[in-house]
Image (spheres, grey):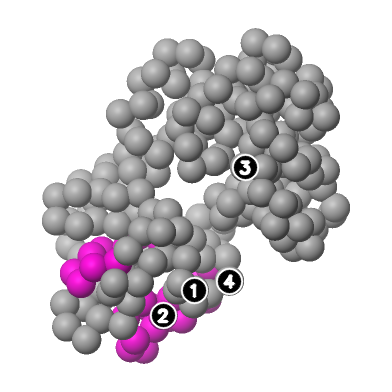
Amino acid sequence: MYVVINGGGKVASYLARQLLDRGHAVALIEKRAEVVDKLAAELPSNPLIIQGDGCDVAYQEDAGVGRADVFVAATGDDDDNLVSCQLAKIAFGVPRAVSRVNNPKNERIFNALGIEAISSTTIISRMIEEETTIGDIRTLTSLRKGKMAIVEVELPTDRCVVCGKQVAQLNLPVDCILVALIRGDEVITVHGDTELDAGDVVIAFTRVEHESTLKKALTGSD
């Protein structure tokens, strides 16, 4: 299977790594030169990486969207994701377009246009409705034959070591991605500049063996 991914952030790079590890062919389109260099250095199998705008037909053509089985828009901007998916479908006839949706209110628009919309906020909200008891660290679900997990960690209300810090400043374990924050009745999609507050419940995707390291990084305790 050949997959083209628009974006080079944590979500896109993790997806690319998983696909490459499974033997699929992958190309990525990313605007930022420093991110392109990082992807080239870290991803296995030397995938095709195009520096450019995934909403531009020329860069999609360079990435081979015309022969792709799937086009994935994984940037943090819903408008860019929508435009790039529409371009892949209309200009290149890609059979399947899948998009990350940061604002769950936009899911209906994506779905109406034939784009498979995936909103971490909606997924986490459903999980929270099913899991009402919040512990110090709790495994919500296991994936990849028990190797990966989606977990929740409640930040302490006193002596919080990460409160006031941005997510990009945290020293997180390898292969760990913060997906969302539950703050009162609100579910917040996490970005690099998202700041943590005391009492936040952090939803994270991590390797099972790194759960204790993640807990220590977020709470300061073992």
Q: Is residue 3 visible?
A: yes
Q: Secondary structure at mark 3?
A: loop
Cα separation, mark 4 vs mark 1, equals 7 Å
Answer yes or no: do the residues labelled 4 and 1 have beta carbons within 8 Å? Answer: no
Range drawn in magenta: 196-222
Which of the two labelled residues, at mark 4 and mark 3, occupies the earlier sequence position? Answer: 3
Near-viewer residue (24 or 39): 39
Please name the amino acid that badge 2 sits on. Ala
Residue behind mark 2:
217
Which of the two labelled residues, at mark 2 and mark 1, occupies the earlier sequence position? Answer: 1
Q: Which mark is residue 37?
A: none
Residue behind mark 1:
172
Please name the amino acid that badge 3 sits on. Gly
Image quadrant assignment for residue 78: top left
Q: Is residue 118 visible?
A: no
Cα separation, mark 4 vs mark 3, equals 20 Å
Q: Local crowd at mark 3 within 10 Å, few (<14), some, or many (≥20)? A: many
Determine if the magenta segment contains residue 202: yes
Which residue is found at the position 20% from the left and 57% from the top? 183
Mark nearer the viewer, 2 or 3: 3
